[in-house]
Each structure stands twice: as structure tokens, then as C-alpha cells.
Amino acid sequence: VQLQASGGGLVQAGGSLRLSCAASGRLVSRKVLGWFRQAPGQEREFVAAVSRGGTATRYLESVKGRFTISRDTAKNTAYLQMSSLKPEDTAVYYCAADSTAYPGDFLSDLPSLYEYWGWGTLVTVSS
């Protein structure tokens, strides 16, 4: 499985960006796709995840209402629409894929459970 993240950049506080994660490879359509971020000197943290069918989502509490994750199953691409950006959102954003078949609509927020990772894309929010 290969993941290619794009869409990062420099934006002023209050602005918006949309990140894309193009996924390819074996059975990628059966994998949960997630976004994580890592700011300098900090651990990688979960941001959002979307289920295989795109119907279930999960968010970091601090981004709820500002970020929206979605998935185009035909294109095997996940998106992270980020609005009302804050300087504290500044980080390298990574997309990841999780093969685990969870019951119901459960989605993991643990980086260790995501087997596949793409290169990050830098998001910088200026104040």
C-alpha cells in the first residue's frame, strides 16, 4: 500500500486548506484511512479517520467542527478539509492506513495500529 499526501502550505489564521491522500495498492479500499500530525518537538497525534465505506468518521476533539474528513472510494483518495485554522494546527500532516477489521463503526486513534504511512505534508498557519 502506498499513500501520497498533498495539499499542505502556508495559510493565515482563520484560513482553509484541503489535504489529499491518494492511496494505491492491494486491498486499499478495505482499509481505514486516517490523518495524523506532528509538530516540532511533539509526538505524533491523531487528527481524523474515515471508515472503509466513508460512512463513519472520528476526530480529535480540538478539530471537531473545523476539520472534515471524507473519502472518495472510486478514487481511493481521502481528504481533510481544514477550516478556521489556528497557529496550533501547524504541523506535518501524515496520512495512514489501517487494515484492522473493527466491529461496527469503531476507528482507531492509535498510530501503532496503522500499518501504512505516507510522506507528510507541511501545514503552517501564521498568526
Image (cartoon, rainbow, N blue to C red):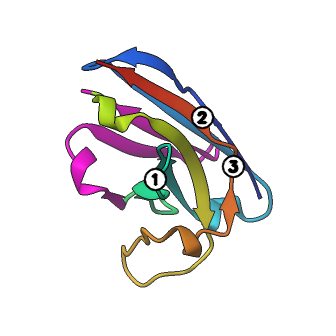
Amino acid tagged 3: Gly
Residue 15: x and y in percent read 31, 18
- Residue at the spot of label 3: 118
Chain-order first, disc 3 or disc 1: 1
Q: Secondary structure at mark 2?
A: strand
Q: Which mark is residue 1?
A: none
Q: Is residue 39 above or below residue 86?
A: below
Is residue 44 or residue 59 the one in the foreground? 44
**Closer to the camera: disc 3 or disc 1?**
1
Q: Position of residue 88 (x, y in %)?
A: 31, 36
Q: Which residue is mark 2?
A: 121
Task: Look at 35% across and 22% down and name the residue there.
Answer: 16
Give the spatial CA distance, label 3 vs label 1.
Answer: 19 Å
Distance between mark 2 and mark 3 Cα atoms: 9 Å
> Where residue 112 appears, x then y in whole percent?
57, 74
Choose the circle earlier in sequence order: 1 or 2: 1
126 left or right, relative to 115: left
User: How would you rate the neighbour count of disc 3 (Cα within 10 Å): few for under 14, some for 14-19, many for 20 or more?
Assistant: some
Q: Find the magenta span and give its range.
A: 56-84
SS under mark 1: loop
Any magenta on residue 4?
no
